[in-house]
Amino acid sequence: MSIENNIGISSESDSTKSTQYATFYLGNRLYGIDVMQVQEVTQALPVTVIRLAPSFVKGLINLRGQISTAIGLRELFELNTEEVKENMTVVCRIDGNLLSLLVDRIGDVVEVNKKDYEPTPDLIPSSIKRFMKGVYKTDGPILSVIGVDNIIAELTGRNEQSHNKSHKKTQGAFQ
Amino acid sequence: MSSSRDQEISEFKTEAMDLLDVAEKSLLALDSGGDFKLHYDSIFRTFHNLKGAAGMMELGELQSHMHELENILVNSKESAVLKKELIDFFLRGVDATKQLLENKTIVFDYEVPISEPPIDSAVTSPDTPVIANAPHKPSTSTPSFVLSESSMGEFLAECDEISERLSKNFLQLEQKTNSQETIDTIYRDFHSLKGSAQLFGFSQLGELAHLMESCLDPLRKKKVQLSNFLVDVLLKCIDLVDRMIKSIREKEPLNFKTQIHALTEALEKMISDPQGDDSPMPENIVPQETTTPTTPGVDHDKESATTIRVPVPLLDRLMTLMGEMVLVRNQVLQYSSQSDDLEFLNLSQRLNVVTSEIQGEMMKTRMQPIGNVMSKFTRMVRDLAKELGKKIEFTLTGAETELDKTLLEAVKDPLTHIIRNSCDHGIESPQERKRLGKPEIGSIAVRAYHEGGQVIIETRDDGKGLHRNKLLSKALEKGLVTHDKAASMSDRDVMDFIFAPGFSTAAQITNVSGRGVGMDVVRSNIEKIGGVVELNSQHGKGATICLKIPLTLAIVPAMIVRCDNDRYAIPQVKLVELVRAEQNGNGPKIEYLQGKPVYRLRGNLLPLIDLKEILRFPKTDQQNSEVVNIVVLNAEEQYFGIIVDEIQDTADIVVKPLNRFLKSLTTYSGATVLGDGSVAVILDVIGIAHQQQLITEKKDQLLKATNSREGQLKNQNTQEFLLFKLNSPTKHAILLSYVHRLEEFKREQIEYSGQQRVVRYRNSVLPIISMNDFLNFKPKIDISENEIISVIVTQRGDSVYGLEVNEILDVLSTENVMETGLADRAGILGNLVTEEEIIVIVDPQRILMEISKTMNQNSVTPSSQEGATLTIGKVFSPKKLKILFAEDMVFFRKQVTKVLQRAGHTVVFAVDGKDALNQLENTERDSFDLVLSDIEMPNLTGIQLAKSIRLNSKWKNVPLIALTTRCDKASIDSGLKAGFDIYLEKMNPEELLNAVNQLIHSKSEEIAA
């Protein structure tokens, strides 16, 4: 995911309206997701473990009859998994699929200023950077913006290389 | 019929409008400088899809309109830019399409308004009638379909037929008042006349037909009654049609505009004023035949009372709520079971019943048999075949397979494309097929069935299939692949190209297909609904395209099992039985075969999988629990058992797909919410079987059989033997790896093939070899008294053999080394000394070799009679032959074909002597190197066949082999007399191959001499 791309995505949303982010904490780190992508916030619900699944997939949650996949952000962001207090979930709906991101604490919905935006610094390892859309220098701690669609795309791409292949073909056909 | 057609049309229209909106958006996006490729594709797809759909809905005008638009669009693909004028043009085109959809008539100018001045200034003729269809004007820039003389002849013949039928029907109609059936027939005829006239570019004829059709429409819908006036006008129309056809036949220009105009005017009045109150020709209208104004209204009410249109999202929502209601019901039931309150129990029971019923009905609202969509294809194939001058037989099986409505809708377009492609590119022309030795009539077979929680729709044609090199060169041309890479690509990858957008190998673009949009759409549409497209093709033999559609919305019955603390659902479709194996009892226990657990289920070895192991639960020491629960499953006809901790319950579950990034876990096929609100994962039975390589096991066994014995003996420390009893005090055993299966047969199942005892076994013949006889053990007790015989099935080469033993005893696992010194005779490998006893190890491979030797000696060949020795295994220079094989029984056909094909020969089979003779008649001399025939066949026996062949001048010298179960001296003599060169017994692969080789060898020597 190149930097230009990151800017492209955020400027697109900026042009329509000022962006609001639903924020939450993992430990003392502040993260945010585009508020339009968040369906709801819930208490931690019982999770059914999926054996054999990658470690960041914590399991499945019954969200009023719908099945949501619980994602451990700690695992994704390679954070310390020892002091886990994941009490809340942030539920996102992407392409009809539900994702429950396990978080420690919910923050406010914040409105950010475009001038505070900065692309994800290069010092962040690319294994983490690929899930991020950039950072905002807010008054409080720095807000790291998570791209939920990036997560899906990355994780799906990891498993569906064949699909990627066919996409490449698609592009090739017109060149 | 008419109401369902109306419904289809209205559904089609809704969909078409949506598509047009998309195209419009794309056009507008292009106008404002959007990405060309993206939007071009979207517009193109809309046009193409609409064209196809219109064709299927028999909307001729729309189809030709879309075809024109598409053609013009294609021209601008190269320039990679759509000029403003063109965008305007297409927007107008889209508007016109919408009007067409609203049953309005359009006059559309297909002249492309490019900056250069229009070539043809007189675009529309001045006297274009008011009711005009899209005039099909073959534009000069894009060649539309090329008409051959023969298709024109067909067209005219069809017109004659139609007009004849029309006159007849009209007369009938006049005599017998309003017969709905007759009216429908007439209507259909008008319609097809219109369609084909437009297809062939006779717009005037088309107009006329359209005119007639539209005035019949109110009659057909019973809005008006038939009046003499109407009949008169229509008959006049038909006369005009006849004259037009005559003109067309004589290749005269059509000039009937004035006549059409006059008729149009007369009919227009009729249509606009069906009551005919102030009609200019009132004398022609019989008063009582006018309808009362209320009638149409009543009809309308009736129709709307039986069906209503419900938006699918609403149904989806209802389904979701239904799922939740089922959960609540389950919870109530669970709660009530602990209650003593009778009233409450009663209520909960009623809730249960009602909920189940609602659930069932709810499901029905969404499920539709695939036939609803597929039956249309029959017509489509027929029309396409006609259009393309091909002969195609279309078969449809599994039409009753039900699929969710949304999924059904989603597969409709892809299927249309696939079948169109098959018709157009797959099936060859009858001449071509004849030349290739295929039956003249090509076949396209669509089969739909459920498998593993999926609906599989398989389209198979026997056309030319895909050509690797053609695909590759196209791919190179398009720059999809580099030269270096191309050579190393697998066939599968190469075939994948067909799914790339804009990829088409068709040399000519036709109205049917060939722009390569189709397969691209197929894949994207199927993948959108979570399905898979698989393509298999053999060049020259045809292609099979498999659509695997998940049943995401379906409620399936499932078995809930527990493993550790987790619960898993197993779809009942795959479930065969549940087995409780008590480890300490007398019954069968779990045993280990090469370290893998197996269970003897009624004499068959059932491979077992520990669910804990596949799910990688941490290992525990509770290996020796007293009772083991086994769920016996069937994955693609391979049975296996899964060991679970507990079998809990059956439940109807709503299958929900797993998130896309979990799709790679082939262990699971989805998830579901259980009655208590917890989530359970659904096990993918086939996925697990593949993972554990149970399905491919047969291949492994073949490999094992070819491995050297020594290698097996040395490489493993622990060896496992199957112990069995013979008429001997000593126990005998064979290496377990040789054991294919253990079977029990009833004595009466045994039949004889010559001297050989055989049993029919899985569609083939299993020779039964008595170990007692072979090892010369005299029966102490007469074992023939036993009703049941125990048989060890083993494999040698490609064939299976049954070794009959007295009793199967046990499986012995030992590290002891076998002593080979005491192998005193053929078939004995050595002895195994255990703590208690000595066991004789038998070598089944050797025994089979010995047996087959003796079997070979029994058969009679002319060479052996003449004293020439036929050595087993002697290899003549192997020449690849083309063999005609006449055999009426399927399993012999299969077996022998397999043997011959293994040896590299090509086998063409005939179902009986007559068929064989026909095939010989119809092929060129020397196109078969050899004829192999059964003796007893219906229609024409082998003897008769041989005689006929020997009398036939073309074929009299062809080598002939008889292959039969009738091997007594008299039969052999009569066979040889009839002209067979060699007379063989069935079931003897080596000998057959040798005889084939030898015969060819001697024949060629004969020729050389």
Image: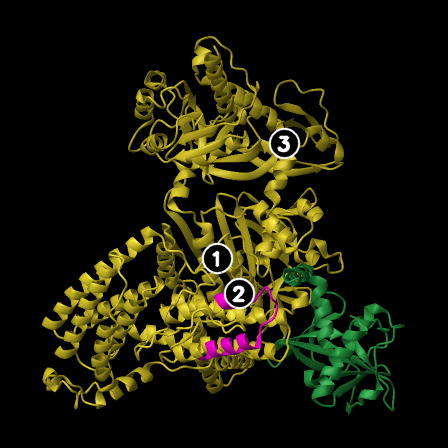
Q: Secondary structure at mark 2?
A: helix
Percent of width and height locating residue B959: 42, 21
Percent of width and height locating residue A96: 61, 76
Measured Cα–Cα span from mark 2 to mark 1: 11 Å
Residue B606 versus residue B95 in the image, above or below:
above
Q: Secondary structure at mark 3?
A: strand
Return the chain for callout 2: B
Percent of width and height locating residue B800: 53, 34
- Residue lying at 57% horizontally and 36% vertically, measured from the top left: B808
Which amino acid does the dot numbered 3 rest on? Ile
Residue A78 versus residue B986 in the image, above or below:
below
> What residue is shown with label 2?
B74
Which amino acid does the dot numbered 2 rest on? Val
- Asked if badge 2 and badge 1 are on a common chain, one would say yes
In the displayed structure image, the side of residue B912 where residue B143 appears, left or right: right
Magenta stretch: includes residue B681: no
- Residue lying at 32% horizontally and 63% vertically, measured from the top left: B196
Return the chain for callout 1: B
> What residue is shown with label 1?
B509
- Count of labels in the image: 3
Disc 1 vs disc 3: Cβ atoms closer than 8 Å? no
Disc 2 vs disc 1: Cβ atoms closer than 8 Å? yes
> What residue is shown with label 3?
B734
Identify the chain drawn in green: A
User: Is B223 or B883 nearer to us in this picture?
Assistant: B223
Nearer mark to the viewer, of 1 and 3:
1
On the rendered image, what quadrant is the N terminus of chain B found in? bottom left
User: Is B311 or B164 nearer to us in this picture?
Assistant: B164
Mark toward the start of the polypeptide (2 vs 1): 2
Query: Magenta segment range?
Result: B71-95
Chain B pictured colour: yellow
